[in-house]
Amino acid sequence: MSKWYDDEPHRQEVRATEPRQRPQRARKNTRRWCKGKIGVDHVLEVRLSKHATSPWRNGTPPCYRADWSRKNWWCNHERYCTRCGKIVVPSLNDACPDFTAEVTRHRASEVARLRDATRSKTDDDE
C-alpha cells in the first residue's frame, strides 16, 4: 500500500501533460459607449442640472463660491450625452463656464449679513 501523497501525480505534472487552453476573453466594457453599443462615442453637451432650479435653493445661483468656504466652487453644470441622456460628468467644478475666483454674493449670504448687522446694532444699543 502506498502513501496518500504518492497515489496521484503532482499538479505541475498534470499541467505539463494537458493541452494548453486559451485564456477566455474578458467582457467588453460597454459603459463607456453610447447605449452600450461598442464603438459608438457619446455626443457630449453641458447643461444645468435639474437640481439647479429647485425651489429649495432660495435664490442661490446655480454655480457659486461661498464666503464661508472660499476654496470650494459649487457647480451645478453637468456634461451629458444628447443621444442616450447619460450624465457622464455630474459636476464640472473648475471647468464650469461660470467659474470665477471671486466670492459670489447671493441672497442667502446677504440675509445672513443683514441679520448679523442687526444683531450688532441691538447689542450696541443695550
Image (tube, grey):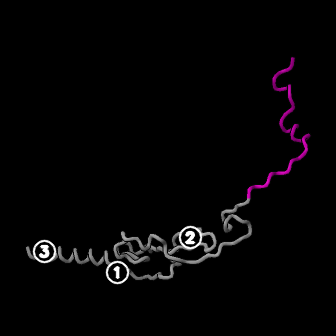
Q: Residue at position x 58%, y 77% from top?
A: 45
Quadrant the C terminus occupies = bottom left
Mark 1 lies on residue: 105
| Horizontal side, residue 88 vs residue 37: left or right | left
Give the residue number, with chain letter if any, for mark 2.
89
Q: Is residue 103 magenta?
A: no
Splitting the image into 4 quarters, where does residue 86 fall?
bottom right
Say above or below: 24 vs 55: above
Q: Secondary structure at mark 3?
A: helix
Mark 3 closeness class: few <14, some 14–19, many ≥20 residues within 10 Å: few
Q: Residues within 10 Å of mark 1 (few under 14, many from 20)?
A: some
Q: Are marks 3 and 2 in contact (CB under 8 Å)?
A: no
Dot placed on the residue nearer the N-terminal end, 1 or 3: 1
Can you say whether 120 is above or below 37 in the image?
below
Amino acid type for the residue under numbered disc 3? Thr
Residue at 40% across, 77% down: 65
Residue 68 relative to residue 3: left or right: left
**What secondary structure prevails in the magenta region?**
loop
Q: Which residues are magenta?
A: 1-27
Q: Are discs 1 and 3 less than 8 Å apart at CB?
A: no
Residue 26 in magenta stretch:
yes
Q: What separation in Å lies between label 3 and label 2 (alpha carbons)?
A: 48 Å
Under circle 2, the secondary element is strand
Give the x, y percent position of residue 70.
Answer: 39, 75
Q: What distance separates the C-alpha of mark 2 from that of mark 1? A: 26 Å
Q: Earlier in the sequence, mark 3 or mark 2?
A: 2
Q: What residue do we see at 34% from left, 80% from top?
A: 105
Residue occupied by mark 3:
122
| Amino acid type of the residue tagged 1 in the rendering | Arg
- Quadrant of the rendered structure where residue 72 is? bottom left
Label 2 crowd (10 A; few <14 / some 14-19 / many >=20)? some
